[in-house]
Image: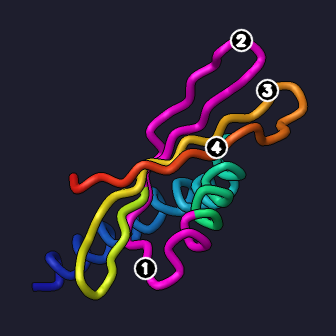
Amino acid sequence: MRKFYLLGLLFVSLAMFIQIPVVANAQQETPAYAKWGQLAIKEVKAKYPTAKIVDYLHEGKEVQGASTIEKFKLWLKQPDKEFGVHVRISYQTTTQEVEKIEFQESTS
């Protein structure tokens, strides 16, 4: 019985030791698109003030000449429906000045 207790204690200690660096790194790294994701959330909340945002996905970015387009999908829930909103934020790559924000609703 004591043998299993010691093995369990060793396993838990090892698991805790392995997870510490992973958690520390996760807290330090901020994705490059985070600024644009916050803007997408802010704009969706303004456009759909009664909806609750239940999910968020960065779908990637496109570079088109001097502009960059960051693409997001947010999943919203209202009392009568759930739906997705694709958000495309176009900005000047060098100055990061927003050129245009587009919204497109989807059901999937």
- Region rendered in magenta: 44-73
Discs 2, 4 touching: Cβ within 8 Å: no
- Above or below: residue 2 compared with residue 90: below
Picture coordinates of residue 53 (x, y %)? 43, 73
Task: Find disc 2 in the rendering and name its residue.
Answer: 65
**SS under mark 1:** loop
Question: Per the image, is 92 magenta?
Answer: no
Task: Find disc 3 in the rendering and name its residue.
Answer: 93
Discs 4, 1 touching: Cβ within 8 Å: no
Q: How crowded is mark 3: few (under 14 residues within 10 Å), some or many (20 or more)?
A: some
The structure residue drawn at horizontal position 64% and vertical position 16%, both measured from the top left corner, is: 64
Mark nearer the viewer, 4 or 1: 1
Q: Of marks 2 and 4, which one's residue comes earlier in the chain? A: 4
Compute the Cα span from label 2 to label 4: 19 Å
Find residue 51 and name its label.
Answer: 1
Q: In front: 105, or 3?
A: 105
- Of the 4 image quadrants, the one containing the N terminus is bottom left
Residue lying at the far left in this picture: please name it: 1
Discs 1, 2 touching: Cβ within 8 Å: no
**SS under mark 4:** loop
Mark nearer the viewer, 3 or 4: 3
